[in-house]
Image (cartoon, coloured by chain):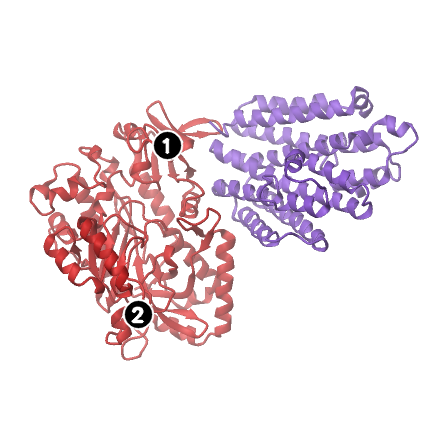
């Protein structure tokens, strides 16, 4: 397939995943803002930071009210990372790669975009927000379903999956990094066990608050949360899960092409070197340093994929 | 659609005064249903109008979901519009189609013979049948093609011949499209939509298939391999990209043929071949179905500012490394200034009279013609020789005095840039409206494939319909719609 097409599939999936992650971040932020108005601005700041748009936001906005931040993240034309812009980019990439998509996948992407345009024509009222966010998640679910249900397991499919998991790993690592200070053992040690609402926010931003309880019961510990989101390979948004999938899809691509690549080696190394655990050793080396290192390695992998498979000239 | 036709607009004077009745393809002058439409009409009369209304809305949603939209030139980049689709088919009897297709085949053969001649010995010019300066001073003439033999001897692999009808036996060729005619995806999707909406209709009426067009296109293209091709030819479709108005069609055709859809930046010259950048390195292409104009094909040899083409493709073409479809330089055959010579061109190369007549055309570059056109401006349609899409034209009967005066000045300043035609009384076919069936003007663009093995014409083609009452403008860029076109089995 064309390098450009592989790149379009990869980016289509990344942008869709990103839009869903942003929706989830807004959801979690909004929940805190409702229940704890005093901490809302701080929470919105960290949401913006996680989404990677904090400094851009600060250049044009002074306050951090829910309405302002939510509008910025959902539909502000000045924000290239708004959900509306991202989904538009996902759709443009899908159009470019259209010949490689099944009709079902294309229709899911296109319908998602059309729905979103209609929903976000005007600023979203607070009481409509949960519905809008749920719709965004649902539309993404439809694309995912169509992808796994109708696409040939060829190189194109694997490039799209690779994009999904690379983006997801990036997102989970960012959430943890923005909140890492809450998870520092020292905070827990000095008696103020970590703030219930805060940890729930973290888990909610990856749709995992219930899964956590199933797994760990009522025990809330920084170590456990970090272990869950970093090393627990059954949790579909954990770094371990995402990296295993990346290695797997790159493995398939290498097998299809009968050619090993540097990107393939890097993905395997990422799993082996950074996700072996145990969690204590990650904390010993510094959680923040660990996450920074992971984000850098993940980004380097993305660049290598782009080079090895000739997304651009 | 990017290659579109200019035609009369607004209400025709004759219609207003009520002297002329337009030929309706469904209902005869006496009020009965014409034979090709009888089975359909029986079905229609037994249907509930609200059900059809509902189906119409379904069709629109269906078109939007699959993204059959087009961008209007000059409009905001994000503005994607639907071409209105009408659920009443346009039906052509087997006998009518036989006659039409013979005329179309003759015409396409002549176009190819003309192109070969113009780029070789130019016998038609020596014989004085076509004025030399009309070719020599024409921007669409590509001197670099002189002496070139395109692979398989084919110039117009794909052409679209625009036909209008004015009576039971009166068909005219309005325009030839020998560059990159568009609209075939609408022909195919219209049929697909009709099959989904009214499957029972196709059990009642024997309609000829159109769905094998993409396979025939692939076969036709593959039959014109360049000398350097080894083994099974690799075909690719070259598109200007997702912002082009016909992008949907480009991706649709690539998809249907199982060919790669490439843009200029995916291609480069590698070891004397045009190669596309794949995930595994550069791979040569044998046949390039380009949907990019000649000018933009090669920045080294043509327009230097073009980002749509491939630097050096011309040299590869010349050396037999790739087939370009349609061949560069075919624009000279569908130039509006040459159109009026088509009857002579056909006779010159086939030795036969043209089976399908031209619309009478005045060449404003000729003083006698210009005088007549200036005298009769309010009743004529005047078009730019190189224009398309219904832009930059005058429709006398629909224009105000001021508009006519302004156009007169333009015309007098550069007469050779214009041709004029009478306002044709185009036939009508009913469309479905809330108030029932209502006649609207239509035209027809059959699609013709040419390969060394012969000519294939898909039965029917794209019927375009002016959705507004009385309007003669069927261009999609001017609010025209489309219909499924049925050619009946014998």
* Residue A283 location, quadrant: top right
| Spot occupied by residue A128 in the image (x, y as percentages of width and height) | 70, 55
* Residue A27 location, quadrant: top right
Of helix, strand and loop, which one carries label 1? loop
User: Relative to residue B274, is residue B169 drawn left or right?
Assistant: left
Q: Earlier in the sequence, mark 2 or mark 1?
A: 2
Callout 2: few (<14), some (14-19), or many (20+) C-alpha neighbours within 10 Å?
A: many
> What residue would you read off at disc 1?
B285
Question: Closer to the camera, B13 or B462?
Answer: B13
Chain for numbered disc 2: B
Q: Would residue A158 be seen by someone viewing this image from the given angle?
A: yes
Q: CA distance from mark 2 to mark 1?
A: 45 Å
User: Relative to residue B169, is residue B234 drawn left or right?
Assistant: right
Query: Which residue is at 38% across, 71% downward?
Result: B40
Chain for numbered disc 1: B
Query: Which residue is at 50% across, 57% downward?
Result: B62
Of helix, strand and loop, which one carries label 2? loop
Question: Closer to the camera, B140 or A152?
Answer: B140
Question: Closer to the camera, A122 or A151?
Answer: A122
> What residue would you read off at disc 2?
B25
């Amino acid at each position: 397939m064309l390098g450009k097409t592989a790149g379009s599939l990869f980016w289509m999936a990344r942008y869709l995943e990103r839009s869903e992650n942003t929706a989830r971040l807004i959801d979690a932020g909004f929940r805190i803002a409702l229940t704890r108005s005093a901490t809302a601005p701080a929470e919105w700041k960290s949401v913006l930071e996680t989404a990677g748009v904090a400094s851009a936001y600060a250049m044009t906005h002074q306050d951090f009210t829910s309405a302002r931040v939510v509008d910025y993240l959902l539909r502000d034309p000045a924000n290239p990372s708004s959900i509306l812009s991202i989904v538009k980019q996902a759709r443009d990439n899908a159009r470019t790669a259209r010949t490689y998509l099944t009709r079902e996948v294309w229709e899911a992407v296109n319908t998602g975009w059309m729905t979103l345009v209609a929903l976000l024509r005007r600023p979203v009222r607070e009481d409509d927000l949960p519905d809008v966010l749920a719709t965004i998640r649902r539309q993404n679910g439809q694309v995912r379903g169509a992808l796994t249900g109708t696409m040939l397991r060829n190189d194109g499919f694997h490039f799209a999956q690779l994009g999904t998991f690379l983006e997801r790993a990036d997102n989970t690592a960012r959430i943890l990094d923005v909140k890492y200070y809450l998870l520092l053992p020292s905070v827990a040690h000095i008696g103020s066990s970590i703030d219930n609402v805060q940890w729930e926010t973290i888990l909610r931003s990856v749709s995992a608050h219930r899964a956590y309880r199933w797994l760990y019961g009522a025990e809330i510990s920084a170590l456990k949360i970090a272990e869950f989101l970093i090393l627990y390979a059954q949790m579909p948004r954990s770094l371990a899960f995402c990296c295993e999938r990346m290695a797997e899809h790159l493995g398939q691509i290498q097998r299809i092409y009968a050619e090993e690549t540097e990107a393939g080696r890097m993905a395997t190394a990422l799993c082996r070197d950074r996700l072996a655990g145990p969690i204590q050793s990650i904390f010993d080396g510094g959680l923040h340093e660990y996450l920074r290192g992971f984000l850098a390695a993940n980004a380097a992998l993305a660049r290598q994929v782009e080079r090895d498979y000739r997304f651009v000239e | 659609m990017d290659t579109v036709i200019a035609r009369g607009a607004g209400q025709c004077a004759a219609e207003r005064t009520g002297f002329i009745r337009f030929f309706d393809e469904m209902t005869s002058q006496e009020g009965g249903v014409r034979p090709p439409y009888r089975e359909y009409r029986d079905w229609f009369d037994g249907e509930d109008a609200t059900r059809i209304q509902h189906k119409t809305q379904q069709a629109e949603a269906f078109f939007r979901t699959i993204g059959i939209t087009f961008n209007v030139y000059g409009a905001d980049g994000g503005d994607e519009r639907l071409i209105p689709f009408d659920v009443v088919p346009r039906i052509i009897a087997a006998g009518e189609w036989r006659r039409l297709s013979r005329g179309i085949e003759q015409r396409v053969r002549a176009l190819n013979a003309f192109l070969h001649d113009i780029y070789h010995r130019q016998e038609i010019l020596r014989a004085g049948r076509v004025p030399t300066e009309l070719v020599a001073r024409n921007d669409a003439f590509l001197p670099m093609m002189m002496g070139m033999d395109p692979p398989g001897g084919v110039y117009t692999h794909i052409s679209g011949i625009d036909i209008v009808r004015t009576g039971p036996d009166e068909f005219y060729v309005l325009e030839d499209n020998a560059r990159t005619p568009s609209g075939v995806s609408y022909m195919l999707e219209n049929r697909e939509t009709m099959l989904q909406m009214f499957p029972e209709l196709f059990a009642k009426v024997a309609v000829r298939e159109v769905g094998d067009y993409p396979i025939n296109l692939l076969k036709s293209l593959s039959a014109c391999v360049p000398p350097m091709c080894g083994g099974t030819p690799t075909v690719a479709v070259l598109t200007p990209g997702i912002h082009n108005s016909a992008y949907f069609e480009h991706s649709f055709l690539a998809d249907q043929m199982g060919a790669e859809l490439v843009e200029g930046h995916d291609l480069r010259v590698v070891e004397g071949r045009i190669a596309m950048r794949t995930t595994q390195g550069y791979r040569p292409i044998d046949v390039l179905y380009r949907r990019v104009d000649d000018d933009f094909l090669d920045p080294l040899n043509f327009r230097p500012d073009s980002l749509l083409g491939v630097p050096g493709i011309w040299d590869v073409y010349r050396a037999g490394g790739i087939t370009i479809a349609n061949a560069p330089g075919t624009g000279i055959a569908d130039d509006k200034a040459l159109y009026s010579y088509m009857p002579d061109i056909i006779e010159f190369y086939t030795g036969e009279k043209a089976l399908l007549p031209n619309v009478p055309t005045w060449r404003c570059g000729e003083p006698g013609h210009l005088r007549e056109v200036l005298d009769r401006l309010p009743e004529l349609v005047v078009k730019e020789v190189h224009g398309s899409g219904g832009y930059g034209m005058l429709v006398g009967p629909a224009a105000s005095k001021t508009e006519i005066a302004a156009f007169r000045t333009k015309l007098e300043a550069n007469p050779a840039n214009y041709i004029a035609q009478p306002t044709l009384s185009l036939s009508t076919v009913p469309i479905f409206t809330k108030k029932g069936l209502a006649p609207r003007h239509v035209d027809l663009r059959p699609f013709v494939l040419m390969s060394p093995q012969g000519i294939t014409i898909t039965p029917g083609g794209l019927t375009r319909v002016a959705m507004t009452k009385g309007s003669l403008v069927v261009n999609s860029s001017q609010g025209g719609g489309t219909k499924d076109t049925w050619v009946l089995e014998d």
